Image (cartoon, grey):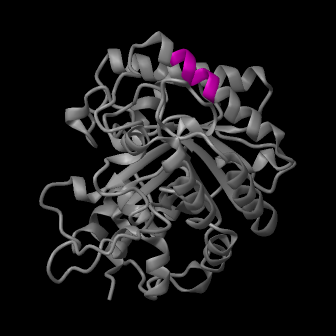
């Protein structure tokens, strides 16, 4: 049996600043929207444990795998993964259980093929178009397109480009390359007949202080803060120059929306992305998570009520990480598998979430 607190193992919460949307879409902006979301992670940006052995254990992530074996070997493996890990059947299942938002994480190689990168560039955009447009047209879902990586690496993590890569910071070449990738993603959104159903998130968990991962010190002050702002402001300016109504999603880098809000003009079309990782809190048990979720949501620093309840009540909703967890390793004796904490579809299959999205237990005291 999965404890309800497992729902809060990893949640992305959203806080609107001045986010608005085109009146042509049923999505009217993050000021009023309540996301009940799931992340389609480990699909177009590969993370080994979630994907269940797509990359052999001898390699740490997509970069080291493709660098070692070459694209002729890793390419077909990854293409098969793109066509099978997330399908329209998964979207059907999520819709039946109340999901109205999907966040789709991508590598920068999905959008552009840089000669010095070992991240694979193939047919990811075709897979992305199939799933995102199906979610929108069939179920009126909102789609968040996100970059997990940027050229050079943003945080030393596998998902930031490759393990140990953190050279995006203060590098003019990588900054320029990042803006090329941004332009490609904006082209993709603008070319959709359902462009108003997208939000754009151009960076994930940036950190020039990788020794302080998942803390408020992950981005240094003032140099790191200023560089993050330089990038986001450049992306926002590009979107404005194109006349796009798409909302920009901004990582709060574990510092909270209130930390970053003063750097943006009132009415800016942005929404803050807050990540809640209870595994990163020393000494926290599963029994404490419900209380902590409510406390965070009330303070407007995070979201997803013990899971759905608190985040829907206090903020703009959230998106559960991740849709699937295919590694069956136990966490510890008596606590079940990782999939019971990190897999949305596992929670569905085990009856934690009922059809329509209702939880089997109701959170009290929020």
Q: Is residue 307 left or right of residue 272?
A: left
Provide the residue span drawn in magenta. 175-181
Residue that lies at the very extreme toward the top in this rendered image: 172
Return the x and y of residue 288 as percentages of the image width and height: 22, 69
For the point 51% across and 54% down, which residue is it? 315
Count of all numbered marks drawn on residues in the image: 0
For the point 32% across and 74% down, which residue is it? 5
Return the x and y of residue 328 as percentages of the image width and height: 32, 75
Specify the quadrant of the image occupied by residue 133. bottom right
For the point 27% across and 36% down, which residue is it? 216
Would you say residue 299 is visible in this rendering?
no
Would you say residue 309 is visible in this rendering?
yes
Q: Is residue 62 above or below residue 26?
A: above
Q: Nearer the viewer, residue 37 or 158?
A: 158
Q: Nearer the viewer, residue 128 or 361?
A: 128
Quadrant placement of the C terminus: bottom left
Q: Is residue 38 left or right of residue 280?
A: right
Q: Is residue 152 left or right of residue 31?
A: left
Please, what is the dominant secondary structure of the magenta stretch?
helix
Return the x and y of residue 354 as percentages of the image width and height: 54, 86
Return the x and y of residue 342 as percentages of the image width and height: 38, 67
Quadrant placement of the N terminus: bottom left
Find out whether residue 331 is within the magenta segment: no
Q: Is residue 57 above or below residue 149?
A: below
Q: Is residue 335 above or below residue 319?
A: below
């Amino acid at each position: 049996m999965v404890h309800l607190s497992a729902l809060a193992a990893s949640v992305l919460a959203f806080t609107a600043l001045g986010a608005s949307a085109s009146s042509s879409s049923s999505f009217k902006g993050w000021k009023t929207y309540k996301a009940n979301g799931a992340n389609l992670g480990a699909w177009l940006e590969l993370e080994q444990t979630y994907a269940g052995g797509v990359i052999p254990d001898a390699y740490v992530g997509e970069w080291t795998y493709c660098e070692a074996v070459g694209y002729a070997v890793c390419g077909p493996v990854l293409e098969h993964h793109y066509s099978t890990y997330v399908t329209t059947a998964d979207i059907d299942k999520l819709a039946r259980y109340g999901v109205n938002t999907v966040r789709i994480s991508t590598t920068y190689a999905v959008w552009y093929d840089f000669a010095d990168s070992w991240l694979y560039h193939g047919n990811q955009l075709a897979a992305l178009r199939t799933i995102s447009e199906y979610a929108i047209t069939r179920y009126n879902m909102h789609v968040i397109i996100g970059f997990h990586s940027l050229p050079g690496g943003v945080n030393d993590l596998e998902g930031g480009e490759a393990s140990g890569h953190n050279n995006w910071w203060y590098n003019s070449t990588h900054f320029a390359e990042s803006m090329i990738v941004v332009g490609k993603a904006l082209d993709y959104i603008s070319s959709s007949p359902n462009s108003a159903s997208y939000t754009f998130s151009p960076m994930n968990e940036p950190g020039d202080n990788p020794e302080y991962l998942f803390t408020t010190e992950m981005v240094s002050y003032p140099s790191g803060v200023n560089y993050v702002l330089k990038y986001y402001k450049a992306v926002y300016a590009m979107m404005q120059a194109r006349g796009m109504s798409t909302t920009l999603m901004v990582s709060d880098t574990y510092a909270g929306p209130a930390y970053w809000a003063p750097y943006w003009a009132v009415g800016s079309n942005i929404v803050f992305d807050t990540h809640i990782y209870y595994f990163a809190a020393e000494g926290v048990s599963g029994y404490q998570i419900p209380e902590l979720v409510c406390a965070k949501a009330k303070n407007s620093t995070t979201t997803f009520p013990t899971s759905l309840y608190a985040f829907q009540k206090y903020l703009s909703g959230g998106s559960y990480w991740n849709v699937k967890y295919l590694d069956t390793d136990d966490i510890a004796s008596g606590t079940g598998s990782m999939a019971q904490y990190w897999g949305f579809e596992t929670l569905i299959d085990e009856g934690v979430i009922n059809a329509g999205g209702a939880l089997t237990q109701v959170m009290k005291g929020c």
